[in-house]
Amino acid sequence: MEGGASVADEADFKECLRLTCSQPYILRLVFSAGIGGLLFGYDTGVISGALLFIRDDFIELQKNTTLRETIVSMAVAGAIVGAGLGGWMNDRFGRRPSLIIADVLFLAGAAIMAFAPSPAVIIVGRGFVGLGVGMASMTAPLYISEVSPARIRGALVSTNGLLITGGQFMAYLINLAFTKVPGTWRWMLGIAGFPALLQFILMLTLPESPRWLYRQGRKQETATILRKIYPANEVEEEIESLRKSVEDEMVLEGSIGGQSVFGKLKKAFGSKVVRRGLMAGVIVQVAQQFVGINTVMYYSPTIVQLAGFASNDTAMALSLITSGLNAVGSIVSMFFVDRVGRRRLMLLSLVGIVVWLAVLGSTFLRAAHNAPPVRDVEMRPFANQTCPEYNPNVHWSCMDCLRAASTCGFCAHQGNTVNSVPCSSL
């Protein structure tokens, strides 16, 4: 799953449910910020289905896989920049303004893509959405953790991860729902603007993070917000806990001060505890990305079509299985983490990932090795329309044709008739 989240156990969720039902204000804070996770997941899932219809509308995409990949990856590139900006903006301007700006970027990107006249404009819109994704993925979990009561903080932060996978599943459902609607892909991409607009309006009515306010010396505002979150008899205790936590944090920052970012990193790595913790966290995140789940989510319908299901509708319907299992996996992990343990659950998950990636890879490898041969007798009637790379004196298969050039395909056009033939020029 894209974007990590802390995992809470079953007891945490029971306490979370009890407390949020008795204090709806907490639920409002968390839900409003959690829409960022929903948008993150929706953006990940929606392009997979929309790409099939964008490809049908723009002929240049049918012959240029690089252009299709650019449309998909531009959001990731934007997210890298957005995440870096989000970290800086969180500290400088606060969590609330950062989420509001992320919503503006989401809205702008969704509008640009919905009315895009060309693939180039879609790429620009994807860049805007990516910036919003990066900023929201940095800010939403942070805001949720800082406005949540300590005893249910883990459970509430985990809801951000649930909303990410839920957003992916929702994207696949919406893709399937809009397959028969005129302007199919425009609706798919543009509809992301509605939850972004909702979050924008909600965030205008919500307070800043009490932790950020305290660091800025705005202690009176901090106390006012905490009184809305905690029972009256716990407010002073929480203020004292926050004071100690912020002071300890500032002391730690001072102890690894240095004259530059590199100086701070050097001093931080001098601590064995920091070094081991950082390495463990980085390795887990790198492993999460390198297993390829993001690629599967971005290209799931395309993969299904490569497996032999040519219909766009069928490909998206079958892709619901992938996104549905992804969402179910997030829920299951939360209920088993306390019984099985984090380390064991992670190892079991990695074993499953390795096995199924091996199955997926071997399936495509076998398909490549067993591609139907291209015989010269089939090509003679279409000699003027074959790909330039085609050589009748060399053994060719359909897979060789597809790899030869982006203009190679499986049909030749003569007059008003489309004839099925491999290795012809499209």
Image: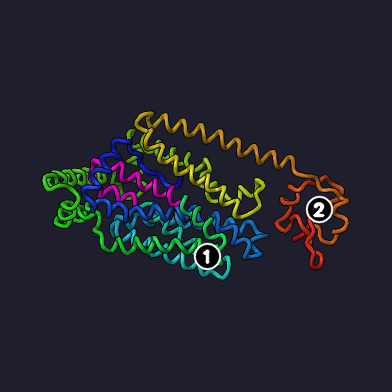
Give the residue number, with chain letter if any, for mark 2.
390
* Viewer-proximal residue among 272 and 242: 242
What's the residue type where badge 1 is placed? Arg
Contact between labelled residues 2 and 1, with CB atoms less than 8 Å apart: no
Residue at 73% of width from left, 47% of height from top?
Answer: 399
Dot 2: within a 10 Å radius of its alpha carbon, few (fewer than 14), some, or many (20 or more) residues?
many
Q: Classify residue 400 as left or right of residue 345.
A: right
> Where residue 55 sits: x, y (%)?
62, 61
Range of residues picked out in magenta:
139-168
Q: Classify residue 158 as left or right of residue 146.
A: right
* Viewer-proximal residue among 193 and 384: 193
| Magenta stretch secondary structure, dominant | helix
> Where residue 37 sits: x, y (%)?
39, 52
Q: Classify residue 26 as left or right of residue 112.
A: left
The C terminus lies in quadrant = bottom right
Give the residue number, with chain letter if any, for mark 1.
186
Q: Is residue 405 above or below residue 293?
A: below
